[in-house]
Image (cartoon, rainbow, N blue to C red):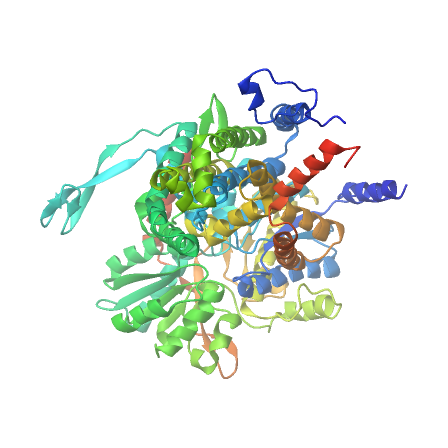
């Protein structure tokens, strides 16, 4: 009755091609934004901001990134955790000032300027001043995009499972690199990276004294920005070439889509988002990180589950899937431990069972994910109350 | 109507918060995942000691104790989540039993004013109380452990280690990397060659590492392992016929669960310890009577007297003693986290007090001060006897080499203070 196209006249092309053509949808979208920006920041606690909404928004960004690659361009990737680690570590380096070393004293022959064959004493050759946190996060995205393009090169030759294995190699290589090359963690004794206190317009956004609303707002701004960019990219020329490649790459090539450009832009844009997610997760949400612990293979699978449950090739699905994966364990624990009083290990084991079961359930009953359920609901609502 | 009733019941259940005065000790345990073999006995010991105090003495100073258990699976994210979730309950002290979680919690607990006790793990330089106001790592830390192991080896070799090779096989994480600095310095001081071999989480696959050990034939192997990594390492050491008496683990690599899977081949394996082993202490009679026989034991109740159970017990005892000290200092029974911190800083463990608690000679004697949050830095060496199925102590208390450790602690903690603009305390 209220949810319908009829009577909502479009008088210009830009009106006609807007994201939410139905008035009700549009207002709902404004309402969600209003609640997210103007109401939630005032009522957040530490726990809600740092442990529920923060991770939800960060994983939404990562899922949007993976969705561009897998959902829109059809390239399977298991390297999400590794790319998030690239984002986190480059954000850390930019936040603390990138330092470049060279062998000042070299016993042995100097093969290249930066390479000494014998024992060498290293000195700092050049140090970048610490960048602002927002700039660091964006730069982390750019660096990750470059790394993503590099690891995306095999996709021009191999497809499907083979590509998945190639990206899996990227995952393990990157984690190994961040664990063993001490330059990445500023030579700290433990191999952990810790975000220094940083400020945006005088408000602290990283470090222990961060107010919950500040943490939340940073994540929200990036999440909304990324979703907006992703939505507009995917319905334009670039997105259409991605989808053409996904649906049938040979046919796409015949009608003039350049597979090199399409696949590599997909890897670049996808990694950019994933890098931003990794940077936010490290700097704003957790405050410190260790490559193998936070960005291991289980993170790659977590993001993959998010887009499978949420729905491949859907921006809304990325948010829905992230909400599902982040909120479900919390909800199960509240029910199990707080309401039923079960021992904590039993609840933890039940979580494995229930999350696993639900993933199988979704794959069988609704392979297109939560986004498809949402689409069906809208379809039904359009006809309501006179379905035919 | 039915819906309304359910909603009412839900709100009632959620609203029924803690009304009575109680002392809250959160237990960030891990009974799941690849580290559960270490997490379960520790969590059981920690919970059982508090149950004993509740049942026998009615709590500490007449105030009952409430233990909140939260599952972390040894994962830093989950650990930090547990912290955020339980800190509002009036939690007095956090003992996360994970170095990764400790690093996450150090800035958070400083901001919230809740003390953190990392007994024999965590950030070693937290021993400097001038910088780390609310982090404690008494009675001993990793660098003490590294030094104790080297001192023990010196003792075995008539005071000379020059020309020997010592390899460190370590968990490739913040935990395993901690002793490398100290061991490097010690190798320069004593003239032995030092090699590091990393094992990635969780450590189920160590063939290549032990192949390397077999090829390079180090005289001694030290291990900084945890969870499933320990069992695999001991099995692999047995497979390459590495002499077990030359293989020494840190105190986190020396429980029954680590050596039993290798059977008789594990005989002679050594590890450090920071407290006594076995259950020949009067306190265990009370635990049997008030906790186990009463059916109130935590977990399955089958861990009583194992090495890590004793460690959990010891950690709980130190926490309870600190709470008692805090009650005495402030003259108040229902203490706050800030008072608890004062109690931890004024903690004195004497032989007389341990005997009074039914744990004579259980741990070292030590006292905590404003400057020194690290205790005495003493440890013992224990050896596994596979035929009797028991750990036997083979050394007395060994004190670590403070000449090497103190400069490192100062350097690291002062760097931390400069990085985070922390003013020195205790002036």
Residue B110 vs residue B290, the one in the foreground: B110
User: Picture coordinates of residue A16 (x, y %)?
Assistant: 57, 22
Q: Can residue A207 be spotted in the picture?
A: yes
Look at the picture and state if A7 lies above or below A252: above
Residue A9, located in which quarter of the rendered image? top right
B60 sits to left or right of B394: right
Q: Can residue B423 be spotted in the picture?
A: no
Look at the picture and state if B292 lies above or below A148: below
User: Picture coordinates of residue A174 (x, y %)?
Assistant: 36, 49
Residue B289 vs residue A275, the one in the foreground: A275
B3 sits to left or right of B324: right
Task: Look at the image and tell me in which quarter the C terminus of chain B lies.
Answer: top left
User: Picture coordinates of residue A196 (x, y %)?
Assistant: 42, 34
Residue A324 vs residue A308, the one in the foreground: A308
Look at the picture and state if A148 lies above or below B201: above
Task: Look at the image and tell me in which quarter the N terminus of chain B lies.
Answer: top right
- Extreme residue in the right direction: B1
User: Picture coordinates of residue A364 (x, y %)?
Assistant: 63, 55
A199 sits to left or right of B295: left
- Extreme residue in the top direction: A11
Residue located 85% across and 42% down the image = B3
- Extreme residue in the bottom direction: B387
- Extreme residue in the left direction: A109
Residue located 59% across and 15% down the image = A11
Residue located 58% across and 42% down the image = A322
Please state the total of marks drawn on the protein image: 0
């Amino acid at each position: 009755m209220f949810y319908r196209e009829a009577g909502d006249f479009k008088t210009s092309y830009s009106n006609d091609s807007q994201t939410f053509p139905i008035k009700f949808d549009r207002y709902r979208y404004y309402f969600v934004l209003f609640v997210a920006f103007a109401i939630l920041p005032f009522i957040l606690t530490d726990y809600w901001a740092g442990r529920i909404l923060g991770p939800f928004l960060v994983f939404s960004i990562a899922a949007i990134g993976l969705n561009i690659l897998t959902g829109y361009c059809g390239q399977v990737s298991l390297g999400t955790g590794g790319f998030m680690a690239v984002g986190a570590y480059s954000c850390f380096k930019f936040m603390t000032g990138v330092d470049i070393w060279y062998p000042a004293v070299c016993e042995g022959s100097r093969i290249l300027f930066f390479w000494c064959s014998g024992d060498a004493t290293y000195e700092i050759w050049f140090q970048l001043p610490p960048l602002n946190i927002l700039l660091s996060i964006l730069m982390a995205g750019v660096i990750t995009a470059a790394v993503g393009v590099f690891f995306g090169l095999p996709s021009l030759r191999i497809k499907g499972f083979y590509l998945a294995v190639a990206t899996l190699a990227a995952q393990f290589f990157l984690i190994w690199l961040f664990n063993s090359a001490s330059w990445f963690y500023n030579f700290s004794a433990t191999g952990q990276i810790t975000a220094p206190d940083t400020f945006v317009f005088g408000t602290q956004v990283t470090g222990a004294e961060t107010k919950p609303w500040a943490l939340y707002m940073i994540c929200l701004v990036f999440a909304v920005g990324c979703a907006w960019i992703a939505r507009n990219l995917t319905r334009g020329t670039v997105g259409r070439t991605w989808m053409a490649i996904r649906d049938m790459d040979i046919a796409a090539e015949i009608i003039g889509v350049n597979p090199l450009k399409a696949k590599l832009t997909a890897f670049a844009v996808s990694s950019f988002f994933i890098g931003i997610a990794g940077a936010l997760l490290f700097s704003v949400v957790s405050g410190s990180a260790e490559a193998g612990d936070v960005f291991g293979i289980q993170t790659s699978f977590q993001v993959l589950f998010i887009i499978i449950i949420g729905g491949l090739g859907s921006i809304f699905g990325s948010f829905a899937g992230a909400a599902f994966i982040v909120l479900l364990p919390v909800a199960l624990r509240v029910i199990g431990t707080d309401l039923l009083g079960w021992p904590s290990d039993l609840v933890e084991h039940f979580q494995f069972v229930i999350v696993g079961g639900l993933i199988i359930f979704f794959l069988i009953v609704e392979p297109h994910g939560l986004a498809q359920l949402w689409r069906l609901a809208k379809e039904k609502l359009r006809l309501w109350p006179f379905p035919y | 109507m039915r819906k309304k009733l359910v909603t009412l019941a839900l709100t009632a259940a959620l609203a029924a918060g803690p009304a009575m005065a109680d002392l809250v000790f959160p237990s960030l345990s891990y009974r799941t995942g690849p580290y559960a073999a270490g997490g379960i006995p520790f969590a059981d010991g920690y919970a059982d000691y508090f149950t004993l105090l509740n049942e026998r003495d009615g709590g500490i100073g007449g105030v009952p104790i409430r233990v909140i258990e939260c599952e972390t699976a040894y994962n830093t994210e989950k650990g930090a989540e547990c912290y955020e979730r339980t800190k509002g309950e009036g939690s007095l002290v956090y003992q996360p039993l994970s170095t990764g979680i400790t690093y996450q919690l150090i800035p958070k607990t400083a901001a919230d004013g809740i003390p953190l006790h990392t007994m024999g793990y965590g950030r070693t330089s937290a021993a400097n109380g001038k910088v780390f106001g609310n982090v404690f790592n008494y009675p001993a830390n990793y660098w003490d452990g590294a030094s104790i192991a080297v001192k023990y080896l010196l003792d075995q070799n008539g005071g000379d280690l020059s020309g020997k090779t010592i390899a460190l096989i370590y968990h490739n994480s913040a935990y395993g990397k901690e002793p490398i600095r100290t061991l490097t310095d010690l190798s320069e001081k004593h003239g032995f060659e030092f090699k590091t071999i990393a094992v990635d989480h969780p450590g189920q696959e160590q063939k290549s590492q032990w192949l390397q050990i077999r090829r390079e034939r180090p005289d001694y192997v030290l291990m900084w392992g945890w969870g499933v990594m320990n069992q695999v390492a001991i099995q692999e050491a047995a497979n390459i016929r590495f002499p077990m008496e030359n293989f020494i683990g840190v105190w986190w690599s020396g429980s029954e669960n680590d050596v039993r899977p290798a059977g008789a081949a594990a005989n002679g394996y050594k590890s450090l310890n920071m407290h006594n082993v076995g259950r020949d202490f009067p306190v265990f009679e009370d635990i049997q009577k008030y906790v186990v026989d009463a059916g109130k034991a935590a977990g399955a109740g089958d861990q009583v007297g194992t090495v890590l159970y004793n460690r959990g017990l010891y950690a709980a005892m130190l926490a309870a003693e600190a709470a008692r000290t805090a009650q005495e200092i402030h003259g108040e029974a229902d203490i706050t986290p800030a008072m608890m911190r004062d109690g931890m800083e004024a903690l004195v463990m004497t032989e007389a007090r341990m005997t009074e608690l039914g744990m004579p000679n259980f741990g070292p004697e030590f006292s905590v001060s404003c400057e020194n949050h690290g205790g005495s830095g003493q440890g013992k060496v224990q050896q596994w006897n596979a035929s009797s199925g028991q750990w036997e102590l083979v050394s007395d208390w060994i004190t670590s080499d403070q000449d090497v450790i103190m400069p490192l602690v100062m350097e690291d903690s002062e760097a931390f203070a400069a990085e985070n603009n922390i003013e020195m305390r205790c002036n």
